[in-house]
Image (spheres, helix red, strand yellow):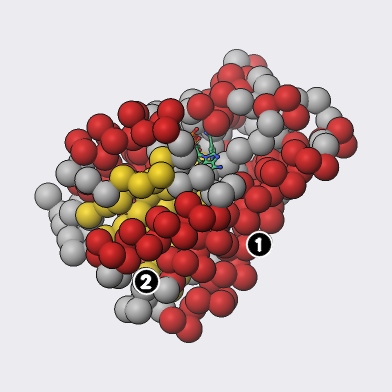
């Protein structure tokens, strides 16, 4: 087995269960030799995340709710104490009130707009700022976005706006940290059946639409997203930063679906 990540240590943020995109990424990185630490959002998730982390040989499992900056600080303090340095971070965190992930974007409330932006966008900047302090020899940061950032996806609403801001953050952070040899990129997967994905009204329709109309005529697995994360976090992509890398069976290149796909 390849061990391209041997000797590399990284933090995985955003595992809720074994369907999470972060879990697909963690499994792939561990298979290729990475040593991992995990965060979980709150006590309710601890009992799910701890056994998953342990199954990959990880015992560094830390509470972190990005709405509470003290827990973000505590996470990086714990990593500094345990490891001293860090090679990579995966940020797979997103949230918006599901009652606003339906209907019109125009009806988004000020309160949910702010909360969505803080959790789904600003938290990446806050995490990145702390992570780079532990990366004296360079590193790689990856976040998760979605194509609803650049094109209108029914019901995605304020999450699309937050993902657009997240993608802009990727470019600004890549420029800020590039001189230190730290790369910053995003993966943009197509729809995946996860807890967060299920919060979007008509998620099943989006899922089936992609299956019918994407060039590959299917959706993607969390392991395939893991493969792309491995590329961005490893020495395979040392010349790549500030990019939004689609992992969506090619859906983003389509303007009008193929006639045969329209008939199915
Ligand atoms: P998921 O529900 O498994 O993961 C979302 C994670 O966000 C959970 O672990 C949750 O605990 C965490 N989170 C939410 N609020 C938080 C907070 N305040 N503090 C800390 N953690 C918090 O769902 P997922 O689909 O694996 O989502 C991971 C990322 O992938 C998200 O950014 C999501 O927008 C993105 N994404 C998902 C899809 C999809 O179709 N599922 C497609 C493209 C991008």
Give the x, y percent position of residue 241: 49, 69
Q: Please give the label number shown on residue 3.
A: none
Label 2 secondary element: loop
Q: In which quarter of the image is the C terminus?
A: top right
Instruction: Let me know if residue 245 appears in the view.
Output: no
Ligand 1 within 8 angstroms of badge 1 C-beta? no
Label 1 secondary element: helix
For the point 38% across and 63% down, the residue is: 77
- Front: mark 2 or 1: 2
Instruction: Let me know if residue 110 appears in the view.
Output: yes
Give the x, y percent position of residue 179: 48, 83
Q: In this view, does 58 lie above or below 155?
A: below
- Earlier along the polypeptide chain: callout 2 or callout 1? 2
For the point 57% across and 24% down, the residue is: 198
For the point 69% across and 44% down, the residue is: 115
Give the x, y percent position of residue 61: 31, 45
Say whether residue 197 is left or right of residue 233.
right
Give the x, y percent position of residue 165: 69, 56
Frontmost residue, 58 versus 219: 58
Tell me the distance, in whole angstroms, between the alpha carbons under discs 2 and 1: 23 Å
Q: Please give the label number shown on residue 134.
A: 2
Q: In which quarter of the image is residue 107?
A: top right
**Which residue position holds label 1?**
168
């Amino acid at each position: 087995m390849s061990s391209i990540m041997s000797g590399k240590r990284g933090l995985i943020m955003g595992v809720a269960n074994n369907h999470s995109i972060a879990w697909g990424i963690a499994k792939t990185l561990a298979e290729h030799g990475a040593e991992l630490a995990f965060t979980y959002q709150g006590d309710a998730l601890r009992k799910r995340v701890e056994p998953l982390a342990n199954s990959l040989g990880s015992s560094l499992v830390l509470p972190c709710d990005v709405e509470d900056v003290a827990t973000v600080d505590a996470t990086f303090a714990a990593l500094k104490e345990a490891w001293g340095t860090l090679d990579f971070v995966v940020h797979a965190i997103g949230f918006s009130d599901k009652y606003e992930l339906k209907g019109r974007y125009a009806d988004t409330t000020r309160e949910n707009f702010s909360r969505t932006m803080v959790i789904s966008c600003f938290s990446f900047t806050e995490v990145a700022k702390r992570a780079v302090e532990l990366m004296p020899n360079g590193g790689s940061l990856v976040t998760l976005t979605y194509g609803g950032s650049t094109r209108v996806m029914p019901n995605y609403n304020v999450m699309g706006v937050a993902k657009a801001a997240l993608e802009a953050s990727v470019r600004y952070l890549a420029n800020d940290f590039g001189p230190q040899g730290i790369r910053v990129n995003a993966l943009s997967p197509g729809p995946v059946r996860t807890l967060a994905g299920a919060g979007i009204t008509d998620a099943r329709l989006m899922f089936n639409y992609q299956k019918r109309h994407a060039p590959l005529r299917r959706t993607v697995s969390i392991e395939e997203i893991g493969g792309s994360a491995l590329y961005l976090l490893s020495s395979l992509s040392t010349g790549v930063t500030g990019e939004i890398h689609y992992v969506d069976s090619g859906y983003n290149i389509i303007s009008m679906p193929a006639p045969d796909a329209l008939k199915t």
